[in-house]
Amino acid sequence: MSLSCIVLAGGLGTRLRSAVPDRPKCLAPVGDRSFLELQLQMLQRRGVERFVLALGHGAAAVRDAVADFDASLHVDSAIEPAPLGTGGAIAHALRAWGLAEALAVNGDTWIDADLAGLLRPLDAGESMRIGLVRVADRGRYGGVELDGRGRITRFAPGGQPGPGLVNAGIARLRLAAFDAAAGRMPCSLEADVLPLLAGRGALGGVVLDGDFIDIGVPEDYRLFCARQGHLA
């Protein structure tokens, strides 16, 4: 089954502004291309065939940039009418394109890993399944606890150092997952939806083995550029 991917590309990018002051953070330059184009190409190689950009801040600039992307990328967009939060933006994009189910990924997340565990259909009783990665220090992200059935049972707050699993910023989800937020808008995926689903035993998790980086802060953006062979 062909599965679309919602890309959250409408954030303000305030943490990255000192390094990328003049454009939306998803368009942060990496050599002569943008992070967004590289991200979409990587996900395409991993099996994603169609993308829907969930846009808000800087929508016009993102749409203009996409017009010059690799022609093999199938990219549509959905512009939120007002700031809806991460959960609200995903739900809006799903409804705008008539999608009952999709992948969703943060527009500042690079996860080059085998996505087979996310691409397979959701199990009975599973409203969402998020990708997880093991990191040496989960303090920046907050931890995730996974039981033997592959269900997420708890999210530990950030600021607690040490190794562990963290949310990799990519998920397979159903539109019905947002019913858990009872129509709340704006709606945060992380704060409003995921804890409720975990409490109901409806949130799955799959550990991904691959290259993970979140470019949302200047030091990690520069690290990503260096890994790609460019200076930021």
Image (cartoon, rainbow, N blue to C red):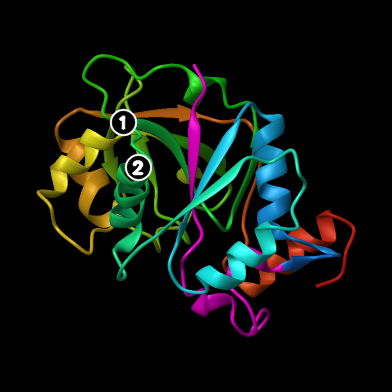
| Relative to 225, residue 152 above or below | above
Q: Secondary structure at mark 2?
A: helix
Q: Is residue 153 visible?
A: yes
Give yes or no for contact between labels 1 and 2 (Cβ–Cβ under 8 Å): yes
Outermost residue, left direction? 182
Other-residue count near label 1 (Cα within 10 Å), few / some / many at <14 / 14–19 / ≥20: few
Residue 20 percent coordinates (x, y) = 66, 79
Q: Which residues are magenta?
A: 1-28
Tell whether position 18 is magenta. Answer: yes
Quadrant for the C terminus in the image: bottom right
The residue at 40%/17% (across/down) is: 121
Q: Is residue 182 left or right of residue 208?
A: left
Q: Is residue 50 left or right of residue 69?
A: left
Distance from disc 1 to disc 2, alpha carbons, whole Å, reads 7 Å
Which of these two is toward me, 64 or 1? Answer: 64
Q: What is the x, y in percent for residue 198?
A: 22, 36
Q: Which residue is mark 1?
A: 100
Query: Residue 26 occupies which quadrant of the picture?
Result: bottom right
Residue 32: x and y in percent read 85, 64
- Residue marked by disc 2: 94
Label 1 secondary element: loop
Q: Is residue 169 left or right of residue 192?
A: right
